[in-house]
Image (cartoon, rainbow, N blue to C red):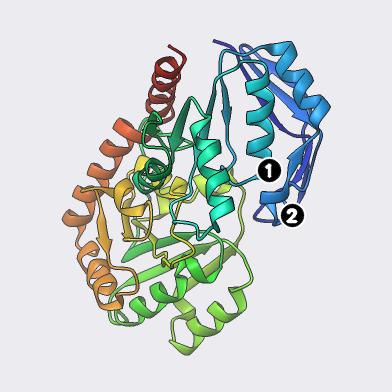
Amino acid sequence: MEVTIAIPQRWREPWFGRPIDVAWERQGGLEVFPLPARGMGKGELAKAKYGRRALKALLRDRRPDLVQIEEEPTTIAAKQVLGAARRLGIPVVLLTHQNVDLQLDWWLRWKHRRLLKKLTGLVAGSDLAGTLARQDAPNLPIAVIPQLGAIAPHEPQHVPHEGLAIGFVGRLVPQKGLDNLLQALALQRSAKWRLTIVGDGPERERLEQLASELRLAARVRWTGGLPAEQVANLWPDLDVLVMPSRGSAQWRESNGQILMEAMAHEVAVLGTNSGVIPELIGDAGIVVPDGDLESMAAALESLSDLNTRRNLAQAARARALRLYSDDAIAERTLEFWRQVVK
């Protein structure tokens, strides 16, 4: 199998806003091909687009058996790539994380349905995303598969320490619910715990102030944003990863990558019922209602018990190896590609 990955020649990294320049490279059957693009990483991805001539030339020269678009169906880029591929008779699969029913006017809704019906198949990042897509395209082949897998260590390492070592990894924005986690921990003031917060964002100053007001500042460590390799070094020091995301009519958690990474490293997981979180955790962790501080505090108290925590951590790793490893996701994706091409 040969795979060509076409990505923007220059774009801005979402978390830190750093410009990234992409160069052509080939390793075995994998080719990374930079395409001229504009509007990538500027906060208005719905308006981003690729260079038309370069996109057309790439598809014409490679003539792939299948194209997978990793853009939401409402974006210009998705429509652009779909049109270019269909003109060459190439079947197209689209990957979507959209798990909130968009309030589109009738014209945009019609265009959205029309685009979905032109696809050969669709990969949904969550059950909810797949359910929403089926409402607009009931006959479209759909597979629910995470976009990325988790790299699982052969033997997870754990550093001995006192108390419960809790971790949060994510952007410091309101929808991530870190303020709820801090307030839940304030209800567990007498317990032995420490919290490591990895990430940065516009809410950091307010959250630091909240931690001080709750008299938790001495037990909270703020690392700021870290690159992926440094986040990987964090897992041996953690007992539990908490994902306290809050949902709304406009947004639900759609990216559970860090959750899968923690599970693969045999770290117990606790999350809310927002978006993709409960389906990723399944019965291998604890799920509490979004915004229920008492339930979150009680869950953290139960995880203070070593046997409870160890059993959940082992179940989480087993689930991650079975469903979320790179190999497992690659096999499921390849099988779906084969089905839709046939």
Q: Amino acid at mark 1?
A: Ile
| Furthest residue toward bottom | 213
Image quarter where the N terminus lies is top right
Considering depth in this image, is 278 or 225 the residue closer to the camera? Answer: 278
Which callout, 2 or 1, points to the residue nearer the camera? 1
Q: State the residue position of label 1.
A: 76
Q: Which element carries disc 2, helix, strand or loop? A: loop
Instruction: Return the disc, 2 or 1, that comes first in the chain's sequence.
Output: 2
Mark 2 in CB contact with mark 1 (< 8 angstroms): no
Q: State the residue position of label 2.
A: 42
Report the Cα–Cα distance between label 2 and label 1: 14 Å
Q: Which residue appears at 32% of the width and 33% of the height?
A: 323
Residue 255 image offset from top left, x and y in percent: 47, 49
Considering depth in this image, is 34 or 156 the residue closer to the camera? Answer: 34
Q: Which residue appears at 24% of the width and 62% of the height?
A: 303
The crowd level at tag 2 (other Cα within 10 Å; few <14, some 14-19, many 20+) is some
Q: Quadrant of residue 304?
A: bottom left
Q: Which mark is residue 247?
A: none
Residue 256 image offset from top left, x and y in percent: 43, 49
Residue 238 image offset from top left, x and y in percent: 39, 55
Measured along the vertical axis of the image, is residue 174 above or below residue 229?
A: below
Residue 284 image offset from top left, x and y in percent: 23, 47
Q: How many marks?
A: 2
The reply, left or right, for residue 328 in relation to residue 70 is left
Considering depth in this image, is 185 or 95 the residue closer to the camera? Answer: 95
Image quarter where the C terminus lies is top left
Q: Which element carries disc 1, helix, strand or loop? A: helix
Considering depth in this image, is 129 or 188 the residue closer to the camera? Answer: 129
